[in-house]
Each structure stands twice: as structure tokens, then as C-alpha cells.
Image (tube, grey):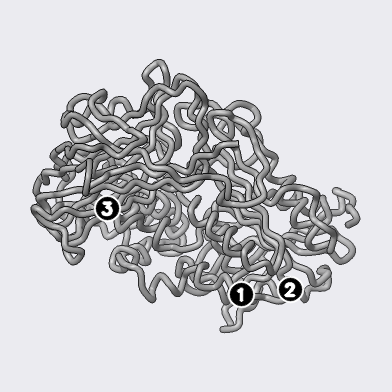
Amino acid sequence: MSVPDVSSIVIERDVAIPMRDGVDLVADVYRPAEGRWPVLVQRTPYGRIPFPDNFVSLNPVTAAARGFAVVVQDVRGRGGSGGDFEPFMEFDDGFDTVEWAAEQPWSTGRVGAFGASYMGATTMQMAASGPPALQAFAALQASSDYYEGRSYWGGALELGALLSTNLGVMAIGSLPRVFPDPRVPRARVMRASLRKVLDDLPHTPVTFPLRDRLDDGSGVLETLTPWFPQWLDHDAPGEYWEARSIEERHDRIHSAGVHVTSWYDAMLPGTLTNFTALRAAGRAPQRLIVGPWFHYALRGFSVDAVRVGDLSFGPAAAMDLDRIQLSWLGAALDDRPQSDHSPVRLFVMGANEWRDEDEWPLRRARVRPLYLTSDGDAATDVRAGALVAEEPTGSGGDEFVYDPTDPVPTAGGAHVISPLISTHGPVDQRDLEARADVLSYTGPVLDSPVEVTGYVRAELWITSTAPSTDFTARLVDVYPDGRAISVCDGIRRLFVEEGAGPGVVRRVEIEMGATSQVFLRGHRIRVDVSSSNYPRFDPNPNTGERSLDATSSVPARQRVLSGPGAPSRLLLPFVED
């Protein structure tokens, strides 16, 4: 691929691109002034201008200087584009935009797509729509399904993330469309309501119905994000979410893809699913890169690419993702072989180094259980609960009371809550472990490093006095100085129709995400168990009703069992070279 003179790059503003239904979507085109070039497409709901404050994950001027034409488009119903916005329904418009780009006189007819977060979603949906001209894509922090792992996790609502992204970002973009004159009183009320709902979100005690906390009476969600109530109403998998799912359309993707994600990003499971499914299909090359970052600090060599939460991962954690994307897209669109690199590149935390692998998940990883046991005081003494390699021979259990009005606060993790509300990533859990509603189970001091790379799960045997309730589990790295740093976590909601209720012994599986973590010599492995993580997840009122609709809540007495017949355990993928 030849490289143009940087001074010859032109920017065409407000280019109308017709869709199949007659609606025009507006784009800016960055391209060399002369010649025909491969095209890169990004579709954004956040406004194509001003750049770079629209979360564009690859600078279009940089790409144009490297010999690409770049189309940055407002999706339907956002920015300058016509029509009505319907989140994650971007398949048809993505197809039409790719085919339009291929037909332009400055195009070679070969097209790539790129984007992070929502733009990662539009990238994957472009690929899943199957346009013949789309040869490659770079998808950063892109999910595979917009129900599980994005809007809900284990049946619980991702409350903090959905409010942060909608009121903190999407609603701001809606204001000028709903209120063209920002001086009208109603517009001022909406702006104030945005701030108030987000500012009040983490405060306790929590009151029910939770829906009242989501709206201060102004109707801000319905007015500025009318799709948000739909997400709340569709609180189970079904046709609504299937219509938006990438997983339902993996068989239509024929493009070469590089998938980039982070151990502390909420979209991590979806990115891993996209990569594994497409690589197994074998229709085009796929590559996976997983770093130690979080959702909002992905690009380049900023301090946020090195320090996440309470840890610094060192200079090696930074990565030039512009170079990686341009290299991948350039090779595919120029019909050249990809560079000689491994299909998987992982950042191994603890060791704080990058490692190349041939597959994900690792075949050499062996899932082994660590069993929960204690003297019955794991709720009151962090030293009382133990993780042991052999199943305990005696029966036991630990109890705690979960009060929905006083939930365990979110402290770190793989989420997309606004950083102004909650810290992301690895965070010291000692304050939470001191609570009476958190059980801690800790393994022995390690005499040599232990690596865990892969998917992490907890299997709990429990009883609860509530007809419906939640259980959470968090993997923790305990340092010699006592710090208890979170690694990954998950939640599982138990519903009335599943047979939960007083006296019923239940086996609960909690998916805790994925990680690559070395527990160093002198450290200890711990799992924390509780029933809430707020405001990341909506607190279960324990009444059998949805938190949004419940008019009251009741405390629940929770019991985690151990021993024969009820072997609660943590399942870890250990890697031994």
C-alpha cells in the first residue's frame, strides 16, 4: 500500500449516505486527495464531531496519512443522521454503509471496519450483516450478546453501567435533538435531572421501588433515552435480545478480525466468545489481544493504560493500538499475509508481562476445585474461612444476613460504571470483607507462584429464607501485607420459579468472568461470597418481585454450606508449564 502526502489529505463534511429505506445518514470522510484507497468505516452514536471527543478508537487523520479513506458516520437517529435511534439494531445500516463505501470513486472496493465500545458493536454488526465488500475489522471492547454480559449478568440488572452510559453519555447526545433550543425551561430541567439521578445512584439506604430512584419525576429516561425502559422490561433472554445478538449471526461473518479487550472490561466475555466462535469457524483469520486495562482507558501509552484501580502493571501494559489496528486492516485490505504473530496475546497479571498463545481458552489449563470450609465464623472473622484442595469430610456452613437496603458497595471490577461513581479494576477489598454480610475463604500461603488463566466459576450450595435472592462471588489476591486485591467476580439471581425458598438446598453456579493472574509466592488465594454488589447490580428485594417494582424489601438469612453432599467450591483453571 502506498502512502500519500499528509498535506494532501482532504476532509469532506456532512456527506449524506442513503440507506435502503430512503433515510440519509451523515458522515465525514477523511481521505487522500487523489487516487483510490481501501476504506475504513466507523459508525458512532456519540457524534462524529468534534474529534477526538467522540470515543473514536483510531484517529482518522492518522489512518488517512497511512493510505486509507476513512468514513466516520453518525448512526441512525444520532448526530446529523436522519431516522430514529434504536440501540444495537445496526445490521442493515451497517451493510448499506459498507457497500456505499465500496462504490465510491476514491475507493478500491475493499472495506474494513473499526471501533470500540458501542462502535465495537456497530463494527461487529457490520461484519455480521455479511456485506461482500467487508474484508476485515478491528473490534475493541465489543460484546457478543446485549443481554447477558452487557445489560444483565446472571439474571441481575447491570444497573450502574446502564445508567452511566445512558444518562452520562447517550442522553447528552439526545438533548439537541429533543430540545433544539437549549434555553427552554424543559431542557434545563432535563440537564439537571441527568446529574441528579447519577449523583444519587450510589447513595444508601436503597429504597424500593427502585424505579423511583431512576427518575426524579422529570421523565428524563423516557424523554432522552426512550429505549432504556425497553431494556428494563425485557429482563429475560428472548426475541428482543436475539434480534440484536452477534452470537446468533456468527455464521455470517467472513471477515478477518482482530479482537481487543481487557481483563477489567464488562465486555470481556463477549469479546472472548466472538473470537473463539469465529476462529473455530475458520472462514478468516482472527486474532485476540487481552490487556490489563479497563473499559475507559484503552488506547495508547497513557497513565491509565499502566495504572488500573489500586495497581500499576508497569510500562509493559501500554500498547500502541493504533499501530496494531492499522497493521491488521492494512494487510487484509491490501491482500497481504498478516504479520508473523500468534493468534492470541495475553497480559499475565502478577507476572506483569505479555505472552503469546496458540488458542483461547488454553488447552493446558486444568480446572481444579478449591473447597470452601470454616468453623462457622466466616462472616465475622476473615481468618475463619478456608480454601482447601480436598473436599471436607465434615459438614458445615456459614450464615449472614443480606439486607437489600444496605447492599455491599461496588468496589472495583470489570464494569462500565462512570469512574466518577465507582472505581474500576483491581481494588482492595478489606473494607468490604469487614462487613458482616461478606464471607471470606482463604487458601494457604503460597510457597511458589501459581497461575490462573481462563474462565473462573464458583459452585455454591446454599439455603435462603427468601423466595428470590442473589449470591455473589469474587476472586481475590491476598498480598503478604494484607491487601486483598480483587481479580474477577460475578453474580447469580435465584428466581421464584426456580424453586428457591426457605429450607430449600440449592446448588448455585456463578460465572465470574475470565482472567490471567499469577498469585505470587507469599500471596494467598481468596474467594469472597455475599449477596449484593451495588450500584453495579440492582439489589434483589428478597420478595420475589423485581427491584424496579417492589414496594418493600425484607432481609434474608443466607447460608453457604460445605462438606459431603454440599461441596461449595471455587473452580480455577490452573496453568502448569
Residue 201, can we see it?
no
Neighbourhood count class around disc 2 (C-alpha, 10 Å): few under 14, some 14–19, many 20 upward? many
Front-most of 438 and 213? 438
Q: Which mark is residue 252?
A: 1
From the viewer's perspective, is the residue at label 3 or at label 1 nearer?
3
Q: Which mark is residue 133?
A: 2
SS at circle 3: strand
Identify the residue shown where x is 66% and y is 72%: 97
Q: Quadrant of residue 567?
A: top left
The residue where tag 3 is placed is: 508
Residues under labels 3 and 1: Cα distance?
35 Å
Query: What's the CA distance linking mark 3 and mark 2?
Result: 46 Å
Q: Is residue 401 above or below residue 494?
A: above
From the viewer's perspective, tell me whether residue 465 is left or right of residue 63: left
Rendered position, 23 above or below 369: below
Q: Quadrant of residue 29?
A: bottom right
Q: Nearer the viewer, residue 190 or 540?
A: 540
Quick one: quadrant of the C terminus? Answer: top right
Percent of width and height locating residue 288: 63, 51
- Using residue 88 as the reference point, say whether residue 11 is left or right of it: right
Amino acid type of disc 1? Arg
Q: Nearer the viewer, mark 3 or mark 2?
A: 3
In the image, residue 452 sits, relative to residue 236, either above or below, namely above
At label 2, which amino acid type do we have? Ala
Of callouts 3 and 2, the N-terminal one:
2
What secondary structure is found at the residue carrying circle 1? helix
